[in-house]
Image: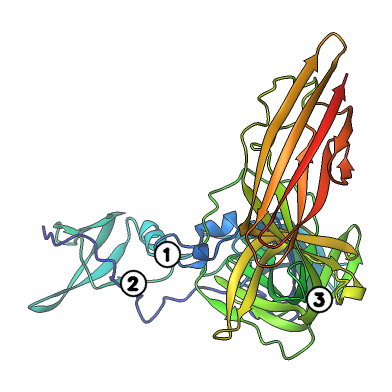
Amino acid sequence: MSRTSRFSSGARLACLAAACTASAGPAFAQDDNAGTSLTIYSSARPGAIPPELYRPVPGQGSYFGQSVPGYAMVRQSAQFDLTRGRNRVNLTNVAAYIDPTTVRFESLTDPSTRVLEQGYQFDLVSSQKLMERYIDQVITIDQQSANGLTQISGRLLTADGTLVLAGDDGRIHSINDYSNIHFPELPGGLITRPTLAWDLMANRAGTHQTRVSYQTTGITWWADYNLTFEAGADENSGFLDVGAWVSVLNQSGASYDDARLKLIAGDVNRIEPPGMPTRMRVEAFDTAAADAAGFEERSFFEFHLYTLGRQTSIPNNSTRQIELFPALARVPARKLLVYYGAMPYYTFGDRPMTDRDLGIPMNTKVDVYLEFDNDEESGLGIPLPAGRVRVSQLDESDDSLELIGENVIEHTPRDETVLLRLGSAFDVVGERRQVNFEIDTGSERMQETIEVTLRNHKTEPVEVIVKESLFRWATNDIVEATHDYEREDSRTIHFPVTVAADGDVVVRYRVRYTW
């Protein structure tokens, strides 16, 4: 009995020169992607696919393709040579994560051609599967040693890590390390790529032009927006240069060459199986050439459809970036400072909230927002798919762009306002306190007086919106206030105020609740 070291990961599998070829079977389709089109649907939350997950995960294979938050409708054209009557045909180069229940086969040459049975074969060739198929059959092992090449032939008894062979002389060989394995032939039933198989009934013999469609998971898309902010004449206005890109992540197990690409934006309802881990793996990152027609947008049912005006290739295990629309310059924008002093945020209950200490914990930070209108007058007026927005500003000292904030947007129709929270102001701070609280349970009323102080340490005046939630009860009245206010809804008011350079402002109001 010969024992050597543990199984070597670098061991090669080889076939005898005479017979290691798989039978293609009758009427295989052409193995190209001519006439391929993709319609990709995304269920990814905007900005929820971080770049670090694009990197390869050694040893994980394409397992995580099943957890990619999206799916696609794939349509492929193929030619089959059919005889009159019953035919068995196969189509290779299809996605590994097909939903077999969605497969549809059509003969464009003879629409009367019927599908009697169809199936999806995914038992792909691997070293372990080959070993399992050769249990109780004779194979030959090559072992390399200091004395040269040694060959051991015998009947394979087990192939679970260690190969155990029974030789013709009755000796048993236990082998863990080898350089090559010779198989007499490739056993039937193993395939090298995922394959769709049909049992067809054709009324017309000859070459049939066909169309095959199916759904597959393991593919998704999302939008990325790159904005550059330019300050305007004052602290509260400016302009944005807007660039938009579509990223297509493909881990479906198939490549799509010269494909016609469509993207669906909107919340399409779909029954999803129980989720898998959201880890993802991608092996390449490319930027598609943008020297031809871009995306054309149009309404489609209650969603929006983006159709790329040229063909593109989307390799397996890759991310492809494509320009969504040409960059737009000098879109008017407004910088907003918002102070929301109540901390934490209280939800509104089904009864008056009479605890005087509610709302006392204070937030001092003033949030910074950029706001712009998605309309034609501003230079936009484009339905914007959900995605991550990155905003930069030019540092004129060295002409470099520096990130000033990120946010996400949901699907945004044209003629709506986009509001982006970028962070907190450094030189503007707020302070909120409760000045007075009175309650009369007999009369079912209470009053509260709130005072908000804003301090501006800039050398220029700033405009700040003081946001206050009247969370204690829906029936309320502002009895007195030091500044004009606007009601956003029955329980939210806004005080727009201007704070002078290196100055401060005190906003005080009294609210009465009744129930």
Task: Determine the secondary structure under disc 2.
Answer: loop
Q: Nearer the viewer, residue 512 or 293?
A: 512
- Mark 3 or mark 2, which is nearer the start of the sequence? 2
Q: Residue furthest front?
A: 503
- Residue contact between numbered discs 2 and 1, judged by CB atoms under 8 Å: no
Query: Quadrant of the rendered structure where residue 389 is?
Result: bottom right
- Residue contact between numbered discs 1 and 3, judged by CB atoms under 8 Å: no
The type of colouring in the image is: rainbow
Q: Residues within 10 Å of mark 2 (few under 14, many from 20)?
A: some
Which residue is label 2 attached to? Answer: 13
Which residue is label 3 attached to? Answer: 331
Question: Is 170 placed above or below 484 here?
Answer: below
Task: Determine the secondary structure under disc 3.
Answer: strand
Task: Determine the secondary structure under disc 1.
Answer: loop
Which residue is label 1 attached to? Answer: 126
Q: CA distance from mark 1 to mark 3?
A: 56 Å
What type is the residue that disc 1 sits on? Ser
Q: Which mark is residue 116?
A: none
